[in-house]
Amino acid sequence: MSNESGSVDTEVKIGFFQLLKNLWPNFLVYLPYAFTISILLINSVIISDIIWPGDDLSVHAGEFGVLVGTSTYMVAFSGILFGILADKYSRIKLFAFSELFYGIGFILNGFVPSGRGFTTFILFMVFNLIRGFGAGGYYPIIASHVNDSTEDKERSQFFGIIQALFQVFQIIGMVISAILFENYFWRLYFFVMGGLITFFGILVYYVAKEPKRGAKRKELKEILSNDNIVYDYQLTKETIKTTVFSATNIIAFFEGIFTTIIFGVPDFLVTFYLQAAPHNLSPLILSLFMIVFGLPGGVIGSLAFAKISDRLGKKNIKNRVYIIVFSIVIIFFCFLMFFFIPLPSITPEQGKNMLFVVSLPSFWMLGLTAFIIRAVIGLWNINQPSILQEINLPEAQGKISSANQLLESIGSGTGPIIAGSVLLFFNQNYQVTAIIMISLGIIGGLLWLLALKWINKDVDRVSSILKQRGLELRERSKTTE
């Protein structure tokens, strides 16, 4: 018995370090993105004061929605470009280019003049759009790179690990940026992060190695282990019709618009809700709140649910769909509950006092809700990419993930813009705004349930095509010997 447990432990350790060895470029470019992704929201009060000195944050909710939303649109549209390129050219070079663009956007943002109203706002938005262009390449390039660097059984483990680390880095980034912005060292933050990210891009370009396309699919692994055999298939009208436009793919495209609303809008609303009057929590306290409650939930949930998802997904890919729907339903109810927990009115000074804030019973109720949300929110990010990779060919991974990212980003980008407008229309009524916006997200869960009808057929179709191609490549290798 002890030998058995020992062997299992060894396998897990080898698998984990093998993932790090094969996929370190993904971690190096994606985790700095996590570290910086929340700077606008967590520091919204201070950034508002940098742009419009003396104005209350709630007055500019609409402009902030535009600032956040337009960047997300840029992520969506640049992702299409990077997705097309990722299926034809070196993923490593594309990683480096995306990272350099993202880093330059940070460095330039450090030079923005403060306190000039519309001029400062426009410059913040322009450099945020530059960062959005670079960030748009991350997901489609990762999807293509991971598909050719790991075997099927390893992908859930990878997505679980990177999702857990994403949440860790996101929350740590919130705290560090909150400290620097609260002390008005925001220029230093942009310069340092921009320099580091630019350096990471250069490092990836010169050190990382490009994986062989298609070499990790179980149907092709044996034949492509021959260095002389190359998977050089491209999408045709027939494969586009039968795989790219499969029922599950189409459903996954459109559910992303609604699902990302339920993921993106609440973060936008929660930040405004807790930082604006009459609750007045400081960015630092809000960041510490996420460390105490959100971080454990995110890490425990991502790592534990990755193993569960992998185990159930091996039995039947439909189980991944059930897990996604479960996560959407739990998040729906928890986010609604969040806005209906009664909170006291506190002064800005009290909002900076950690001891005072933790003495409030409602603070702990919010914390429990945040823990649950963070624990299950990763289920979608763990299972959705695995489903897409199973129902698509190697030469379509970048295009599919970028098309999916396009529609998801439209949802997450439109969400804050609409939410800011709805918030103003209902005179800062967060409860009504939350009900209206979050209700849209439940449509994503219903669409996933619809996909259950076709998903197994779509998986079998791709597997059959790859088996046939494996035979073709074998015959091709015989003729070249």
Image (cartoon, grey):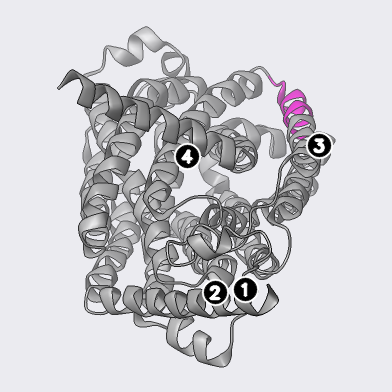
Residue on which the image places disc 1 = 477
Give me the C-alpha separation between circle 4 and circle 1. 37 Å
Q: Position of residue 411 (x, y in %)?
A: 47, 64
Quarter where residue 360 is shown = top left
Task: In this rendered view, identify the residue nearer to me: 383 or 46.
Answer: 383
Residue at 37%, 63% (x, y): give it: 387
- Image quadrant where one finds the N terminus: top left
Q: Residue furthest left?
A: 1
Q: Residue furthest top?
A: 355
Q: Position of residue 356 (x, y in %)?
A: 34, 10
Residue at 28%, 61% (x, y): give it: 439
> Going from the N terminus, do you reach mark 2 or mark 4 first?
4
Q: Secondary structure at mark 1?
A: helix
Determine contact: label 1, label 2, CB under 8 Å.
yes
Task: In this rendered view, identify the residue nearer to me: 146 or 320.
Answer: 146
> Going from the N terminus, do you reach mark 3 or mark 2 first?
3
Magenta segment main secondary structure: helix
Q: Secondary structure at mark 4?
A: helix
Pointer 4: residues within 10 angstroms few (<14), some, or many (20+)? many
Quarter where residue 208 is shown = top right
Numbered badge on residue 162:
4
Q: Secondary structure at mark 2?
A: helix
Determine contact: label 2, label 4, CB under 8 Å.
no
The residue segment tinted magenta is: 184-194
> Going from the N terminus, do you reach mark 1 or mark 3 first?
3
Residue on which the image places disc 3 = 107
Residue on which the image places disc 2 = 474
- Judge whether residue 281 can be spotted in this image: no
Q: Is residue 426 left or right of residue 63?
A: left
- Image quadrant where one finds the C terminus: bottom right
